[in-house]
Image (cartoon, coloured by chain):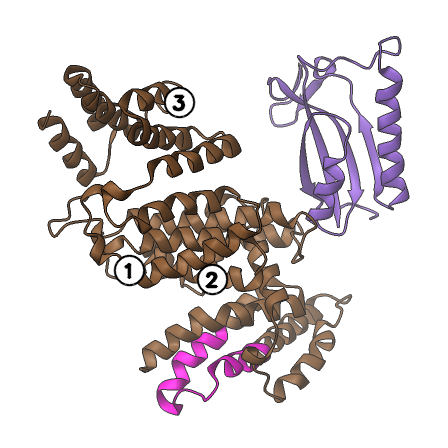
Amino acid sequence: MTLDDALTRLAREDSGRVLAILARQHGDLDLADEAVQDALLEAVRTWPERGVPDNPAAWLLTVARRRAVDRIRRTTSARRRTDTAAYDLAEAAEPAADRGLVEEDPDQMDVSDEQLRLVLLCCHPALNRDAQVALTLRLVGGLTTTEIAAAYLVPEPAITQRIVRAKRKIRDAGIPLTIPDALDERVDTLLTVLYLVFNEGYLSQGDPGLLRVDLADQAIRLTRVVRSLLPESGETAGLLALELYQRARFATRLDGAGELVLLEHQDRSRWDAAMVAEANRLLADALRAGRPGAFQLQAVIAAQHANARTYADTDWPAIVGAYAQLDALTGSAVVRLNHAVAAGQADGPHAGLRLLATVEGLDDFHLLHATRADLLARAGEPDAARAAYETAIGLTTNPAERRHLERRRDQL
Amino acid sequence: MEYMFLITVDESQATPADPTADGFEDLMGAWFAYNQMLVDGGHFITGASLRPSTTATVANLATGTVTDGPYVETKEQVGGFYLVEARDLDEAIMLAQKMPVPAAVEVRPVMYRPGA
């Protein structure tokens, strides 16, 4: 492993756990974050000369602990100078400093409780969605603000400010590092955030960028972390399976010229069989508990596609069944739209069009019109189909999708 | 920590508590129970129900004017408040959610309170 790999690994794999330990110990997220950043900088500074320590995670914990205590001392003495009523924070942290002399190894510690608290804090409903995403990637995922900014194609100061504001709200509004009673609800938010990150990576696939980390892979990595923290959560397993089924198809989604390749025409021999197999195991285990939530149902649908040997082999009635459950569970218009696509395959274009007519509130969504166009074309109504393609083309912003729709229109 | 609950109600919907109306006893009973819960848990600092915003007057110190009406003319108006003590935001939210009224409650941490 090169030095760069070791440093990246330290940030990605170990910094989140160390931050979780320190945040819990001091009850101060900001302090924990600063201390971990100090320690990571020290690794960048000293490792090239001294070499990579035998146990990088233990090294990081020890150094970050010292830096936390240093910071508390500095704050306290600054306060003493200006404030006669200063209370001695350093005293409270002294035993930790002592313990820092005996090197502790995060790999040998059970820090799942601390990690779960941290990740739930990052996805607290009192924070807005952008802040939840940025905090999770930065504090749990160990990405730098530079990496996050590059991944989302936004200026770095915007990400920095988002994180600073979120940390300030956590501190000032008293958002706690606790495991809440309503855990399921909070886990739903957390999984939604992870899936959002995954989809950002999925949709921006093939978009070149010098510093772009693959958000889809980061989301999978973080979902694995959450799964290790919540092994009983069927929805977490469902999300991981869903991500793996989609990730398995990445290489075949675009052709050599960067054009979109429909599921129907993707080269299934190039799908990642190991990922599909892992997803199958995860999903089967999750479904055995008999509580299929939205992520498990979406995984069931993805599983039908991923496991069909050819497009013609696709079990559309099974997919329609899963969509009907998902539709009832979520009441989402986008789910109804996909339900209509599946019904169009299982029961013919007229069945699809009937269901599509019940979709509400998606008039500005290009895929609604593209779907209607496809169904109309198959129902033998080329003029209506052409008009629907025109509407879809006018609404889409993705160049590859627009070219694809234009080709479909021209084939009528 | 201390939090203020700003209770926002849709004044076009909310009917003023009328002692002769059906369900008045139940409504008051629910509020008494809520207040008692706050007191028993050591959360209650103070709180009040306000008269509707039609009775509001704005004294604008910047312009030196005094005008009729609430500061912002919207359908949603502050109808009352509580000042509570809670361990953290999660506990504050949990307390706010127990209020027996279909209102939107803004939960704000107190920065400073003389005498607190």
The stretch in magenta equals A37-65
The residue under label 2 is which amino acid type? Arg
Which residue, given by chain and number where applicable, does mark 1 sit on? A272
- Tell me where residue A75 appears, x and y as whole percent: 63, 70
Q: Residue at x 30, y 46 (%)?
A: A203
| Local SS, label 2 | helix
Q: Quadrant of residue B46?
A: top right
- Tell me where residue A5 appears, x and y as whole percent: 34, 77
Q: Residue at x 60, y 23 (%)?
A: B63
- Tell me where residue B5 appears, x and y as whole percent: 72, 36
Q: Is residue A346 left or right of residue A252?
A: right
Q: Quadrant of residue A141?
A: bottom left
Chain hosting mark 2: A
Is A291 contained in the magenta span?
Answer: no
| Local SS, label 3 | loop
The residue under label 3 is which amino acid type? Val
Is A63 contained in the magenta span?
Answer: yes
In this view, the residue in front, A26 or A208, is A208
The relative height of residue A117 versus residue A359 in the rendered view (above or below) is below
- How many C-alpha atoms fall within 10 Å of the one at disc 3: few (<14), some, or many (≥20)? some
Chain hosting mark 1: A
Which numbered marker is on residue A224?
2
Q: Is residue A404 left or right of residue A369?
A: left
In this view, the residue in front, A280 or A106, is A280
Q: Residue at x 40, y 74 (%)?
A: A9
Q: Is residue A154 visible?
A: no
